[in-house]
Each structure stands twice: as C-alpha cells, then as structure tokens.
Image: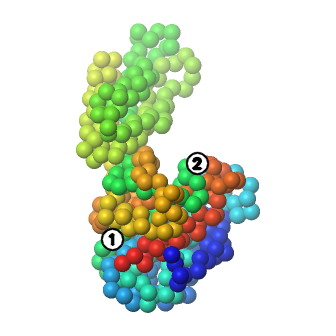
C-alpha cells in the first residue's frame, strides 16, 4: 500500500517508550511539547506553531500535489495515577501514567509526520499535524480551536485514532455518525437536619434521600429514554456522615451522564432535577444542584469514514475491519473538531498474546507494540488519500 514509505518500527517503539516513561498531566505537557518540537524541527515543515492551546503543537506540511487541507491529531496528556506494570519503560513520574494510549498516539503521529515530510512531493494538498494537550478533562481540543488550530491554513477535514484494548492487534474499528458518547457531570448537595441515629424521627435524613435518588436515577435510562437511545447516569461518589450512630446534616453526590444523542443529552438535567425536587419535597430536605456540560458526542462524517474504510482495508484487510463497531460510552474531545469540520475518529486494536489486555485507565495498562505499525500505516494512508 505504501511503496514510498518504509515503516520505522524501531522509531515508533522508541518514541512510544520515551513518552510512556515520561508522562505529564493535562495542560502541563511542557517537556513532551519540547521533545516533539525538537523532533519536528529536524524535518522541513513549512510552519511550526508551538504553545497552541497552552502546550499544543501544529506542524504544517504543504504537499507537492493539489488536494485538501487535512488535519491529523494525537493527544498528549497522561493520567493522575501510579503505574504498577513491571516493564522497563514504566513511568518515571510518581502519580502520573500514560494509561490511555496517548503515548502511542504521539509516537504514531510523530513518526508519520517525519516520514511524510521526506516525501512531501507525493503528498496531496496540505497536512496539519496536531499534537493536542489536555484531552483527559480540560478539553484541550477546544482550547486549540480557540487558539486558531483550524485556520492558517483553513482545515477542510480532520482525523484521529485511538488505541483500543477491546480489539486484537491488526484490527481497525469504524462507525458512522455517533461513535463515542458525550460526557457531562453533576453535583448534588442534600441538606437535612442531623441527629441521633436511634431517633430518626427527630431528624431529616439526607442519606435516606440520597439512597432513594441513586435508585431513581436509573429510571431515566430504563423508563424515560427510548431503548434505541443509549444513555448512562452513574453516581461515582456519595459522601455523608462521620460515624455509625449519627445522622448527618448533609450528603453530597457526584455523577456522570453519557449520551449518544444531543437531544437526549440536553434533556437529562431537567429529568434529574425533577426527581431531586420531588424526593427533597417529600422528605423535607433542601438541595443544591449544579450541572456541568462537558464533551459532546463524537460524530463521524460517513464520507470521511469512507476514506478510513478504504485505507483500513488496504492496511489490515477487509476481514479485520470491524464495521460498524459498537458504540463506545467513553467521551473524547476530538468531538469539538468534528463539530467544526467533517472528519472521522477510528480505533486501532492493541490486544496481543501477552500485552494489551488491560483496559484503558488501568494501572497495568500496556499495549502490544505491533499496533503502532497499524496506526502509522493508517495515518500515512489517510494523509496520502487526496
């Protein structure tokens, strides 16, 4: 498929292991940015913009053939967790780990950028290589857009991949339209009247109300939303009380909401607060409710996905293209660019005989590094598709 470009396997592994051993948290990727900048400056790019969106990098390559302006993106940040995997390239930073594959994403895109720069006369149109900070929460993709990532040059289309532990090495997952979910969160504080645990009639118990609401929220998905529209309402933290025999004044709850439909997504705050108001009124509590909008759903353009399909069939063979792949209820801030420009987001399998079995965000997360070659070929193939 790629007669002009040899796959730099040693470079891919070296880059990936360097990034894995030296992770940095969201919007703090200063050393990562400096490393990528040095490697890119060794090649002949037409423009190199550093510090976009804080610690992001944009490298522009004008090809020798007519064609569109194509943006290829990799995310850069690690997670605030300790690594427990026993590997030589384990994280050197306590409390920080690349547990979501971003180390591999950077290695793939950096090697692809350097390889394509060496054959720029064969490149159709213009390529923008986007190294994005802050995917794990701060919406670095949105920050880069606000800092001009889709202009100068004006981007026509954009693509990104994610390494994925539920697929075998040598497979690629594709899905038209909504692929990854939205991600929003809410905070709820219930205020009652504390007292002795043996005299609940003299108190107003916020724990009882919280317990009722944890159960009731599940009725949103099971009884209020059509079964064809996936939605998740999860309480991730419930905190109340200090000891076994005291009814507290307060209970707090933190939750996340995931949805594939923007219409469903926008309806959830009212549904939650209606239940909170009803329970609070029935049990004589006061409440404070805050809803925080996060990443929108990741929506793929079918025409752009057709490019991914064609490239994937050439790279891994038609039998190894999972199409359509199931929806994924994670969220991904590449959704912001896909809201602004047509594009596609796809997944690349990392599961091998010995590595790649741990899920994303596991302290033992690792990949079968043969996946890097697949990702490299996918990105190069898309770049050369005019």
Q: Residue at x 35, y 43 (%)?
A: 259
State the residue in front, 176 or 254: 176
Q: Which mark is residue 383?
A: none
Q: Are marks 1 and 2 in contact (CB under 8 Å)?
A: no
User: Is any part of residue 327 visible from this angle?
Assistant: yes
State the residue in front, 277 or 144: 144
Q: Is residue 76 above or below residue 48?
A: above
The residue wearing badge 2 is 359
Judge from the rendering whether residue 298 lies leftward or rightward of residue 81; answer left or right.
Answer: left
x then y, percent, for residue 338: 33, 62
Q: Is residue 255 above or below residue 386?
A: above
Q: Which mark is residue 157?
A: 1
Q: Secondary structure at mark 1?
A: strand
Q: Secondary structure at mark 2?
A: loop
x then y, percent, for residue 40: 52, 82
Quarter-wise, where is residue 19 in the image?
bottom right
Q: Could you classify mark 2 by the number of other residues whose Cα lies within 10 Å: few (under 14), some (14-19), or many (20 or more)?
A: some
Q: Residue at x 59, y 58 (%)?
A: 169
Q: CA distance from mark 1 to mark 2?
A: 30 Å
x then y, percent, for residue 275: 30, 27
Q: Residue at x 66, y 50 (%)?
A: 364
Judge from the rendering whether residue 327 lies leftward or rightward of residue 86; answer left or right.
Answer: left
State which tag comes first along the sequence, 1 or 2: 1
Q: Is residue 9 above or below residue 80?
A: below
Q: Could you classify mark 1 by the number of other residues whose Cα lies within 10 Å: few (under 14), some (14-19), or many (20 or more)?
A: many
């Amino acid at each position: 498929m790629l007669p002009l470009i040899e796959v730099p396997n040693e470079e891919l592994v070296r880059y990936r292991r360097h990034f894995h051993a030296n992770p940095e948290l969201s919007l703090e990727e200063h050393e990562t940015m400096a490393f990528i900048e040095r490697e890119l400056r060794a090649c002949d790019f037409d423009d190199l913009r550093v510090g976009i969106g804080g610690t992001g990098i944009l490298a522009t390559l004008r090809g020798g053939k007519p064609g569109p302006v194509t943006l290829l993106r990799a995310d850069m940040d690690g997670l605030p967790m300790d690594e427990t995997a026993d590997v030589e390239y384990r994280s050197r930073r306590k409390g920080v780990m690349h547990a979501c594959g971003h180390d591999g994403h950077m290695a793939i895109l950096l090697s692809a950028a350097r390889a394509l720069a060496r054959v720029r006369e064969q490149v159709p149109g213009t390529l923008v290589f986007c190294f994005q900070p802050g995917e794990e929460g701060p919406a670095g993709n949105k920050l880069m857009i606000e800092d001009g990532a889709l202009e100068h040059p004006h981007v026509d289309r954009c693509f990104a991949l994610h390494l994925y532990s539920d697929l075998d090495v040598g497979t690629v997952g594709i899905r038209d339209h909504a692929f990854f979910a939205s991600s929003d969160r809410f905070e709820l504080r219930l205020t009652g009247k504390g007292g002795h645990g043996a005299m609940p009639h003299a108190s107003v118990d916020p724990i009882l109300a919280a317990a009722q609401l944890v159960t009731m929220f599940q009725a949103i998905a099971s009884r209020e939303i059509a079964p064809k529209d996936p939605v998740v309402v999860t309480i991730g933290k419930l905190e109340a009380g200090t000891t076994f025999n005291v009814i507290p004044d307060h209970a707090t709850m933190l939750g996340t909401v995931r949805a594939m439909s923007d219409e469903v997504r926008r309806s959830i705050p009212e549904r939650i607060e209606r239940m909170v108001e009803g329970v609070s009124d029935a049990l004589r509590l006061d409440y404070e409710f805050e809803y925080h909008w996060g990443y929108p759903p990741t929506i793929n353009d079918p025409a752009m996905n057709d490019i991914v399909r064609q490239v994937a069939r050439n790279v891994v063979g038609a039998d190894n293209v999972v199409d359509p792949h199931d929806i994924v209820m994670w969220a991904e801030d590449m959704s912001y660019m896909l809201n602004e420009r047509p594009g596609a987001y796809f997944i690349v399998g990392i599961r091998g005989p010995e590595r790649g079995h741990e899920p994303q965000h596991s302290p033992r997360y690792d990949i079968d590094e043969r996946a890097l070659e697949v990702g490299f070929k996918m990105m190069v193939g898309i770049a050369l598709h005019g």
